[in-house]
Image (cartoon, rainbow, N blue to C red):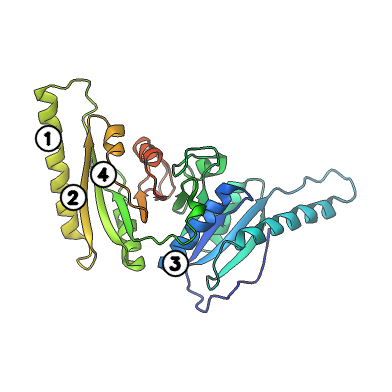
Amino acid sequence: MSTETTETPPATDPTTPRLTVGYLATPSGADGVVLAVALARVTGAAIDLVCVVRPVPYDGQPGLAQYQQRIEAQAARWLAEGAALIPEGFPYRTVVAVNDSFTDGLASHAVATESEMIVVGGTGDGLLRRHTLGTISNELVHSSPVPVALAPRGYADRVDAVLDMVTVAVPVKPGTDNPLPFAEKLAERAELDLRLLSLVSLESPFDDDSSRNARTAQITVARELLEKTRAEVNSELDVDVLVADGATLDEALANLPWDANDIVAIGSGHLGSPNRVFLGSTAARILRWTTAPVIVVPKNR
């Protein structure tokens, strides 16, 4: 069950891709809206700004229908505030969805409208420019049937954000879920540069010749993999390769340079179900360290 406003301005093409944006009247809600605008700016997508409210359980008392209407009206007012962050000319509509779960409400809307991804902010109590998962975002990155785009805290300050490069974490281990096909399609459609990233860390407590030689060998293998991968992607894309290495994975991530206009694509962990998002341990560490928005891609997508 949901109510929605007329799209403003209307999308002229019925095949226009859509983004489902989970909105609450909080700073993180604003972060999600601004990230959705940045994605819409380069992909031409229309924005569905969605607020999910719980149904009032019927207990036989009069006036419950009116109370439900007031709750939905309040959500509609919040959505109007969020829509004020969308610049003129971007097609959008606001939707009040009724569901027992905010996460399920967003996912159901995204599937029903064939949205390309769900876009949300994290929480408002993390480090500025970093990612901190809240209840909703945490549930989404462990269950969503469509890609989930996460805005770092404070992203709403970048109202004119323009994405120009997608960094994709290419797995080194065979059999690991690979987000490259998704990232390549996004780069092609949005005309973004593509950066292929591989992380190397020995995670060894010893700093001796044997450990250093092992890490050097891993770096060589990772570079060979990335160069081979670069030769296989669309030759019209501007593709860069980068191996980030360190004594630990956290050190490797800390050494990574992040541009203000990056967005990062990461795959789902091996414990996830097919065609569902599941944030694995390595992806979670990338999320913790990066200052860029992140898209978590469903397994086998």
Do we see residue 300 in this rendering?
no
Foreground tag (1 vs 3): 3
Mark 1–mark 3 Cα distance, whole angstroms, equals 41 Å
Three-letter amino acid code of the residue under disc 1? Thr
**In terms of sequence position, does the residue under pointer 4 or pointer 2 come before the other?**
4
Find numbered disc 3 in the image and state the secondary structure of the residue it sits on: helix
Q: Residue furthest bottom?
A: 12
**In terms of sequence position, does the residue under pointer 4 or pointer 1 come before the other?**
4
Residue at left offset 61%, top offset 63%? 84
What residue would you read off at disc 1? 216
What residue would you read off at disc 3? 41
What residue would you read off at disc 2? 226
Relative to the observer, which residue lies in front, 62 or 273? 62
Asked if the residue under mark 3 is in contact with the one under mark 4, i.e. CB atoms within 8 Å, the reply is: no
Q: Is residue 183 left or right of residue 219?
A: right
Which quadrant, please, contains the C terminus? bottom left
**In terms of sequence position, does the residue under pointer 2 or pointer 1 come before the other?**
1
Few, some or many residues within 10 Å of mark 1 (<14, 14–19, 20+)? some
Three-letter amino acid code of the residue under disc 3? Arg
